[in-house]
Image (cartoon, grey):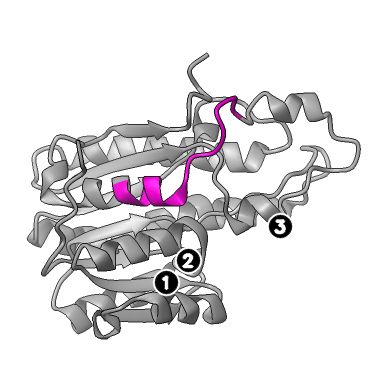
Amino acid sequence: MSLATDMHNKNVLITGAGSGLGRATALAMAQAGANIYLLDINAETLTETAELIANNDRCVVRVVDISDANACQAAVDDAVIRFGGLDALCNVAGMIMFANSHEMTPDQWIRTLGVNLNGAYFLSRASIPHLLEREGAIVNVASSAAFIGEAYAAAYCASKAGMIGMTKSMAMEYMQTPIRISAVAPGGMATNIATDLRPPEGANIDLIKRFSGMRGLVTVDEVAAMIVHLATPAGNAFHGTCVMMDTGITAG
């Protein structure tokens, strides 16, 4: 069964669009016909994403640090002005730092939660009034790390578990409205984040293998297709739920 991916005449804001899953989501949304407003902190890679999009006239890019609440509000305001409304928010941006918990600095902890969780909240807060008007959707990207303990990734696990809690709480709060709020939880993906990730010195590799998955990686295109589906009206059945896409990592 193919996923429904019709987003013609829909306006979508996507974070982390400069690379990895964010870029794949931007390309998939453009292919589905959406007008897309792309955020990333990296201007160079964000421009590269825009250049890959065939219908570039329906694409707007903005360099934003999503851990900044005011910057998030300004981005949503601008997207609504440019497109005339907002139909979906895709909170894709994320980061991970491997570290021994007793060695992770306060700044590293705060930065991880700022990007992975605070940014998603700030953008949701700014977007919800507009999404209510257009019966829109929020799709949050969590992780298999929200459901299992991953050694050397306490901040990342905390942020992604928080994402699940936030998704469920908001889904209950807006249960009697037409807005849809859901999440997807990928396992490991072949992205620049994963490629650049290094375990701390002296790390126990056997502990890392416990959350590495026995059936390989999920692809960014597979996850992006699900994100688009959840954002479409065809994703009406998904509210307050999290779609696991982790090749069985959390199965047992």
Local secondary structure at mark 1? strand
Q: Nearer the viewer, mark 3 or mark 1?
A: 1
Residue 107, which numbered label? 3
Residue bounds of the magenta highlight: 213-225
User: Where does label 1 land, which residue?
Assistant: 39
- Of marks 2 and 1, which one's residue comes earlier in the chain? 1
Disc 3 to disc 1, C-alpha distance: 23 Å
Image: 19 above or below 231: below
The amino acid type, in three-letter code, at marker 1 is Leu
Residue 223 falls within the magenta-colored stretch: yes
Q: Tell me the residue that label 2 is attached to.
A: 66
**Amino acid type assigned to the residue bearing label 2 in the image:** Ile
Q: Amino acid at mark 3?
A: Asp
Question: Farthest residue in the front direction?
Answer: 1
Can you give x and y, in whole percent of width and height, for residue 234 in the image? 12, 45
Q: From the image, state whether disc 2 or disc 3 is nearer to you.
A: 2
Q: Position of residue 50 (x, y in %)?
A: 40, 79
